[in-house]
Amino acid sequence: MKLLPIILLCCLYSVSYAGKGLRPADDSLQYYRSFDGTRIHYTIKGKGEPVLLVHGFIVDGRSWEQTSLYQQLLEKGFQVITLDLRGNGASDHPHDSLAYMNDAEAKDIMGLVTYLKLPEYRVVGYSRGSIIVARLLVLDNRIRSAVMGGMGTAFTDPNWPRRQQFYEALAGKQVPELAEMVKYVQQSGLDQRALCLMQFAQPSTSPEELGKVTKPVLVLGGDRDPDNDTGGSLAAMMPAGMHGTVTGDHNSVVKTRKFADWVVNFLKDH
């Protein structure tokens, strides 16, 4: 297994929540209590039709603020909603394995949508965020359209070896390919226990389930991200799936103007 794609999947950006200073005064920073009492941190910025952004692994909702997509959505008149998935950022960090099972993260998002009284919404995920978006597409009929960035078909296997290796490495087992990832987690002061449990309970969505998703879905990847579906096979699993390729690797693509252009144009049309 190659080290570089694994680390890039894990570290969407080399950014943690701590040490970022105060948020702008016009940024709405809020919390709500999810189905099991877990406190979920979210922000809302702008006005217009809502787009919810789902972050990847070892980052939080603030990672989106560094992307061209975040700014373009606001400029094009969308309302942008970000959240810190449980175990990340300013949300609660449960250390009980049960707290991450049975689609807990998707339920957090669905509960937030209900809390905000949104009749429908668009959703964009990147990397592990796309795995959660897949669950939303199966569970929540309020989704109008979705984008799944930086993800291939491997997550459809509940026994995905890469997920298992991440879990083992974060649980303390010596996995040489992931030693740098664990070191980064520890040096950044991230919650290794929570991150471990996320991998332990990470959901899969079967090809059969994806085959029943009728909402428009754009699958978008980098031309130098071979582990994450540059060939369009994930999009092909869904009846209304579409596929695009952007120049870049896993870590760089999501921050680019081209990625933002693809996503914004898709969301405007769907």
Image (cartoon, grey):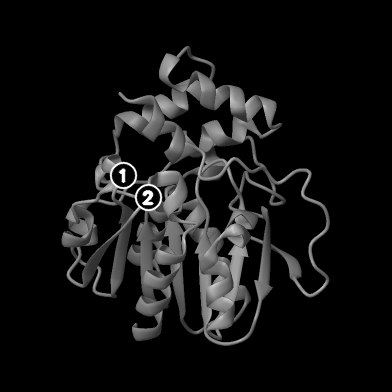
Q: Which residue is mark 1?
A: 224
- Pointer 1 and pointer 2: residues touching (CB < 8 Å)? yes
**Residue 121 against residue 95 in the figure, above or below:** below
Q: Label 1, label 2: how many angstroms apart (C-alpha)?
A: 5 Å
**Mark 1 vs mark 2: which is more N-terminal?**
1
- How crowded pointer 2 is (Cα within 10 Å; few <14, some 14-19, many 20+) is rated as some
Quick one: SS at disc 2?
loop
* 77 lies left or right of 269: right
- Residue appearing at x 54%, y 16% in the figure: 172
Give the amino acid at mark 2.
Gly
Where residue 236 sits, quadrant-wise, is bottom left
- Residue appearing at x 45%, y 68% in the figure: 260
* 248 lies left or right of 79: left
**Residue 89 against residue 198 in the figure, above or below:** below
Q: Position of residue 31 (x, y in %)?
A: 73, 63
Give the camera-side residue of 12 and 111: 12
Where residue 162 sits, quadrant-wise, is top left
Quick one: SS at disc 1?
loop
Q: Is residue 84 visible?
A: no
Q: Which residue is mark 2?
A: 248
Where residue 265 sits, quadrant-wise, is bottom left
Give the amino acid at mark 1.
Arg
